[in-house]
Amino acid sequence: MQNQSNYIVEVTDLKKSYEKVDAVKGVSFSVSKGELFGLIGPDGAGKTSIFRILTTLMFPTDGQVSVLDFDVIKDYKKIRSNIGYMPQRFSLYQDLSVEENLAFFARIFGTTIEENYDLIKDIYVQIEPFKDRLAGKLSGGMKQKLALCCALIHSPDVLILDEPTTGVDAVSRKEFWEMLIRLKDKGITILVSTPYMDEANLCDRVALIQNGEIMSIDTPEKVIENFGRKLWAVKSDKIYQLIKDLKSLEFVDTVFPFGEFLHITLKTEDLNQDELISILTENNHKGIQIQVIEANIEDCFMQLMSTSE
């Protein structure tokens, strides 16, 4: 179908409230044709509410939302026939086999497995040896691939995936994103949500969201460029005491744990590493390591979150 605007998805001042909870607070963003767009944020940020509205499963409280130039309220039937949706929780029929699930979803959309097999082939060949196995008996990674096949079987223009890699092992996560990139190369517009900050780097653009509000929208590279501060990684033999001591120093701005290191920013550029080592040594820290590092998406997210509070 011919889209009349420059964007496949347009969201303007979207709000969603549940009784006394404002889950989405005036969110706006647009997604271009063929783009892989990531909605990045922790649980409770509002990602699922936004995706359920985009897929016409829920009405917005306020704002304007269109998909493929169709309004999510007035034209919900047209939207449903042109999108593929993979919800956060595995929602296929557990007591049907792999092949039966796929055939069922194809039939719903008036197509067949054979008609669109080329679109799902790269994914389906990995689970085809288990086509007679009940969906409920599949591993997490296999369930994920089956759900993606079912979302694609009618050749949708837009694919919407809500936290598709949550709870999946690292190898399956990597394989899944490789599949998404191949689908993007075929011209499918993809919206994906994830709490994993490292997955942001695999998107064309990302929206960093927290507490129902978007803090930044840009390419992953631009988000990192906009960090704009010197970032230090610090560790010692007493990591919990190190957190307290660093937060008590008036020249330290932010302190966030990252694995075995703490990532810190300072209020001044005048302090050097030797001076900080001296201060920490006076506080009985040993095994001190300090290095200037490049920020990543998670550093940017934490900084944006701290400045918005």
Image: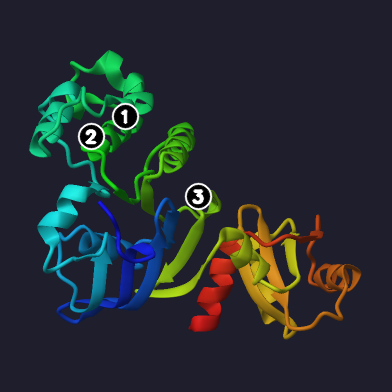
| Front residue of this view, candidates 45 and 161 | 161
Q: Is residue 49 visible?
A: no
Q: Is residue 65 left or right of residue 300?
A: left
Q: Relative to residue 68, is residue 10 depicted above or below? A: below
How crowded is the residue under tag 1: few (<14 C-alpha within 10 Å), some, or many (20+)? many
Q: Provide residue 87's location: percent of width, then percent of height.
A: 24, 49
Asked if the residues shown at circle 2 and circle 3 are in contact, with their CB atoms under 8 angstroms apart, the answer is no
Mark 1 vs mark 3: give the one in front.
1
Please name whichever residue, 106 or 19, is drawn nearer the observer in this view of the structure. 106
Q: Which mark is residue 153?
A: 2
| Residue 94 vertical position relative to residue 303 in the rendered view, above or below | above
Ranked by sequence position, the earlier of labels 1 and 3 is 1
- Of callouts 2 and 3, the N-terminal one: 2
Which residue is labeled 3 in the image? 199
Identify the secondary structure beneath mark 3.
helix
Instruction: Give the side of residue 65 with respect to residue 95, left or right.
Output: right
Which quadrant would residue 15 be assigned to in this image? Answer: bottom left
Residue pictured at 35% horizontal, 31% vertical: 141
Q: Secondary structure at mark 2?
A: loop
Q: What amino acid is labelled 1 in the image?
A: Ile
Inspect the image, locate mark 2, and give the three-letter code of the amino acid beneath it. Answer: Ile
Secondary element at tag 1: helix
Instruction: Tell which of 157 and 50 is nearer to you.
Output: 157
For disc 2, the neighbor class at 10 Å (few under 14, some 14 to 19, many from 20) is many
Circles 2 and 1 in contact, beta carbons < 8 Å: yes
Q: Position of residue 31 (x, y in %)?
A: 39, 62
Image x and y of residue 281, in percent: 84, 67
Q: Find residue 120 and name its label.
A: 1
Residue 219 lies left or right of residue 270; in this view the side is left
Chain-order first, disc 2 or disc 1 = 1
Tell me if I can see residue 304 in this picture: yes
